[in-house]
């Protein structure tokens, strides 16, 4: 079954995690250990972000192959428009399919570091909907995921406008949506309601990041708009430079989010763990995820 089919028909919520290709030898060591450790979590699927330049081949493919070698099942590489011509995307997607990866997260991608606005590559795509349509036409059997922004994309004039663009991605052939991070659950539920009202019927999987510090929040807000609840902000400020305390504050906040989201009918939880397996094995979070899986 594809990820989308599982989200629609599974008798329990799904759990997925996201990795990114390491950029240094130390990062590779940390990633490898995290990948080994997370086999104990047995996630329902894994997503892997793009390497430098946006290509879904190269580092992303290598990470996907390494994860497959460790026994992970459904693995979903990201594919973006960044610095990619149509010929590049053709070659990249062909390699993924030839290697047996039948899921892709299709994204426009963020502007390269140092650039303030996104510029498509020559003969490339400007919008994710174009990429989705291209992938659907070239590889009809792909299960294609796309991103949703519960508090709107930073470049969108309004959430309503952003949902119009999300509907374009769905109409182009997307099979499911994974949200960018949010810290207030009502934001997710209201987003789902607005998507349904707009005619978007595919599964919408909530994406969560257990926050570890105010600095991390500031960094994430530089490319993703999201509201920071006053209680969480106050508690993190009170922790000051006590990193262990701040991490536990973020962990407990994530646990409360997960519990409420599942109770509210979310089809699963996607965790942005940032190659940090230890987060998933805090006893409290581990117990929470076991409850989600019904074990």
Image (cartoon, grey):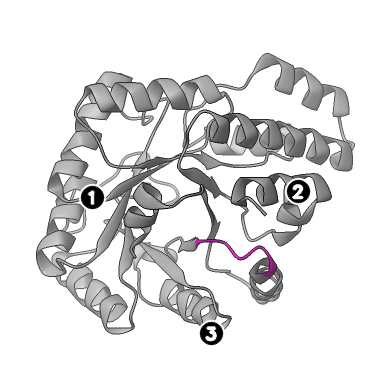
Give the Cα distance between marks 2 and 1.
33 Å
Horizontally, residue 115 falls left or right of residue 47, namely left
Horizontally, residue 147 falls left or right of residue 257, namely left
Residue 111 visible: no
Looking at marks 2 and 3 on the same chain, the residue that comes earlier in the sequence is marked by 3
Looking at marks 2 and 1 on the same chain, the residue that comes earlier in the sequence is marked by 1
Label 1: which secondary element: loop
Give the Cα distance between marks 2 and 3.
27 Å
Residue pictured at 66% horizontal, 39% vertical: 216
Observer-side mark, 2 or 1, equals 2
Marks 2 & 1, CB-CB < 8 Å contact: no
Observer-side mark, 2 or 3, equals 2
Looking at marks 1 and 3 on the same chain, the residue that comes earlier in the sequence is marked by 3
Give the Cα distance between marks 1 and 3.
28 Å
Horizontally, residue 171 falls left or right of residue 178, namely left
Q: How many marks?
A: 3
Label 2: which secondary element: helix
Which residue matches tag 1?
Answer: 174
Quadrant where the image shows the N terminus: bottom left
Q: Which residues are magenta?
A: 40-44
Along the viewing direction, whichever of 198 and 149 lies nearer the viewer: 198
Label the magenta part by its dominant secondary structure. loop
> Residue 112: x percent and y percent?
39, 52
> Residue 43: x percent and y percent?
57, 61
Which residue matches tag 3?
Answer: 69
Residue pictured at 33% horizontal, 65% vertical: 103
Residue pictured at 19% horizontal, 54% vertical: 132
- Examine the rendered structure and indicate whether residue 251 appears above or below residue 229: below
């Amino acid at each position: 079954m594809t990820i989308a089919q599982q989200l629609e028909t599974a008798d329990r919520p799904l759990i997925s995690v996201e990795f990114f290709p390491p950029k240094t030898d130390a990062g590779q060591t940390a990633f490898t250990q995290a990948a080994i450790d997370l086999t104990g979590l047995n996630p329902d699927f894994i997503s892997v972000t793009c390497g430098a330049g946006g290509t879904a081949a190269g580092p992303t493919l290598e990470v996907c192959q390494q994860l497959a070698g460790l026994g992970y099942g459904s693995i979903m590489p990201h594919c973006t428009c960044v610095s990619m011509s149509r010929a590049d995307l053709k070659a990249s997607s062909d390699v993924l399919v030839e290697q047996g990866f039948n899921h892709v997260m299709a994204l426009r991608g963020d502007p390269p570091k140092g650039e303030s606005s996104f510029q498509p590559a020559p003969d490339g795509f400007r919008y994710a909907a174009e990429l989705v349509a291209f992938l659907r036409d070239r590889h009809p059997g792909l299960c294609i995921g796309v991103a949703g922004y519960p508090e709107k994309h930073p470049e969108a004039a309004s959430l309503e406008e952003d949902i119009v663009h999300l509907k374009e991605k769905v109409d182009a052939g997307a099979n499911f949506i994974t949200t960018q991070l949010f810290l207030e659950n009502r934001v997710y539920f209201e987003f789902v309601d607005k998507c349904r009202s707009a005619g978007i019927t595919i599964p919408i999987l909530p994406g969560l990041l257990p926050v570890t510090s105010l600095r991390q929040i500031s960094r994430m807000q530089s490319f993703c708009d999201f509201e920071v609840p006053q209680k969480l902000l106050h508690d993190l400020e009170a922790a000051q430079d006590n990193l262990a305390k701040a991490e536990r504050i973020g962990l407990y906040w994530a646990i409360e989010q997960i519990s409420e989201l599942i109770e509210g009918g979310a089809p699963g939880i996607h965790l942005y763990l940032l190659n940090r397996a230890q987060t998933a094995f805090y006893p409290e979070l581990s117990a929470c995820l076991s409850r989600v899986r019904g074990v």
